[in-house]
Image (cartoon, rainbow, N blue to C red):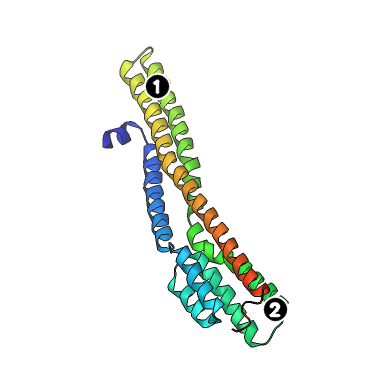
Amino acid sequence: MLEYILDGGMLMYPITLCSIVALAAIIDRMRAFRNATTDLVALRRRVTDCLDSGRVDDAIAVCKEHRGPVAAVLLAGLDRYRKLKARGRATIEIETNVKETMEDYAPHALEPLEQRLNLLTLIGSIAPLLGMTGTVTGMIASFNAMAEMGGLDAAGVAAGIAEALITTGAGLLVAIPPVVAYNVFSRRIERLVLEIEQTMRDLIDFISLGRANQA
């Protein structure tokens, strides 16, 4: 590996740096998503059971036990519902305020998972460009070797071509993992957004149907 880095010329150093940064970002995002993972089925079931029996405080406690953006958004909505209900506000007003609260809080709940995703796309874009630049510098080195020797210098030409091919291949290889990781993480965030929207609809339906009148 070290031999390829040395033969690839100066541009192999930033390409190698890109690979290290990309690996660190991928590991960081994997940990973030793992820490945000929770049993959404159990969360919904327990919260629904609490609300059906008028135990809003217990429903809030259940949300606090679970990790992730879905539980956080639901917690924000339930907390807002409890405060408005205690003030004796009308159901339609509670419904509107709870919906706005959950919609406003959702981006903040997802923000910890979205961090450094742009870094993955940046590396996925830069690494191939660095490789292409290495192709150009390698070919220039080959032609310079030919010019200096006044003809074909096999060793000089081979070194330049090696630099061109190594940097091109390295740039492409380094770009693949962050691009794949970005798409995987983005898809998981999209699924979480759908889960948040469904949870929001469930709570709003609960309020609008008046099932929480005992709370």
Residue 189 position (above or below residue 104):
above
Check the image and name the residue furthest to the top. Answer: 151
Q: Depth-wise, is mark 1 or mark 2 nearer the camera?
A: 2
Residue ID at (40%, 59%):
34
- Residue type of the residue flagged with mark 2: Thr
- Number of numbered discs overlaid on the protein picture: 2
Residue ID at (44%, 34%):
131
Q: Bin the neighbour count of mark 1 within 10 Å (Cα to Cα): few under 14, some 14-19, many 20 and up.
A: many
- Calculate the distance from the C-alpha at mark 1 to the C-alpha at mark 2: 77 Å
Which mark, by number, is residue 161? Answer: none
Where in the figure is residue 175, as x and y percent of width and height?
Answer: 44, 40
Q: In the figure, is residue 108 to the left or right of 18?
A: right
Q: In the figure, is residue 65 to the left or right of 211?
A: left
Say which of 107 and 123 sits in front: 107
Where in the figure is residue 181, as x and y percent of width and height?
Answer: 44, 47
Residue ID at (51%, 50%):
187
Secondary structure at numbered mark 1? helix
Q: Which residue is mark 2?
A: 91
Where in the figure is residue 53, as x and y percent of width and height?
Answer: 54, 80
Q: Is residue 120 visible?
A: no
Residue 179 position (above or below residue 8):
below
Residue 175 position (above or below residue 26):
above
Q: Which residue is mark 1?
A: 142
Say which of 132 and 153 sits in front: 132
